[in-house]
Amino acid sequence: MLSTELPESQEKLLFDWKYRQLIEKIARKYTQNNSIHWEDAAQTAHFKILQGLRTGKFIRKGAEEFYPWAAIVARNAVIDFVRGEKKHNRQSLDRKIPGTDVSLLDTIADQFDLWDAVERANLIVKVREIIENLALSYPKREYIKLWKGLVQGQSQTQLASELGITQSQVSRRRKELLHQVAEELGLFKPEVIKQEQHNLRKSQAARKRSQTQW
């Protein structure tokens, strides 16, 4: 059972500069080169240490014994926290984007493209909604099957065989579909084109800065 109060000697140790430096050093060490914030890891480590003190796992009163004990608890807590976060992030990235067979992980080209990947994922969802509306308006054109085939990398020959039409019809419907989707997204508007060009230049500049830093 947890005790709500700590002995004054132990409470002072938790506010000591040396203790805070120790926790920060451990948290930074095990969260470097990944997207996990060291502050979150440090907070987890501090909670585990506090929990250990309250449950009587550290019965010695001296600072000399406290710091080595705290370092071990913090290290184990941070390692477990980082493993859990990586597992959670991996599962999140592996989940399919609603309405598609594509995962967010599939849209990430490299470690500098995470923001671009999120934007692409949002765009895919919007495109899916547009295609579903078009399919309701033109059911005989089988736009959903056509789009899924394109996403899955099927050739025009395969799509033509599956849909029971010619390759030229697949090509024509594909162009029609892309044109209507682009129109629904407002990509033909001058202001949208300018904004997209601006975003592209901004993204390229950010990627160059990141690569230069590395």
Image (cartoon, rainbow, N blue to C red):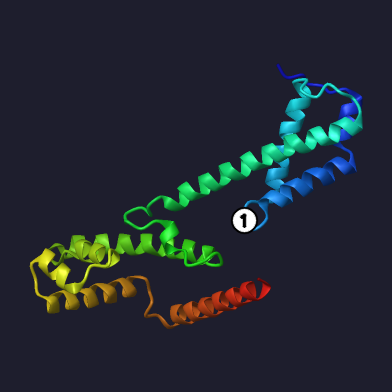
Whole-percent x, y for residue 109 in the image: 47, 67
Relative to 147, is 55 on the left or the right? right
Q: Can residue 157 be seen in this view?
A: yes
On the image, the x and y values in percent for residue 63 come to: 91, 32
Residue occupying image coordinates x 41% and y 61%:
106
- Residue type at mark 1? Asn
**Residue pointed to by mark 1:** 34
In the displayed structure image, the side of residue 126 where residue 9 appears, left or right: right
**Residue 206, how many percent across, how many down?**
60, 74
* Most foreground residue, 53 or 71: 71
Q: Is residue 32 above or below residue 131?
A: above
Q: In which quarter of the image is residue 62?
A: top right
Q: Is residue 46 visible?
A: no
Q: Which residue is drawn at 9% across and 71% down?
A: 165
Q: Residue at x 65, y 71 (%)?
A: 214
Question: Helix, strand or loop at disc 1?
Answer: loop
Q: Which residue appears at 82% of the width and 35% of the height?
A: 68
Quarter-wise, where is residue 6 in the image? top right
Placement of the N terminus among the 4 image quadrants = top right
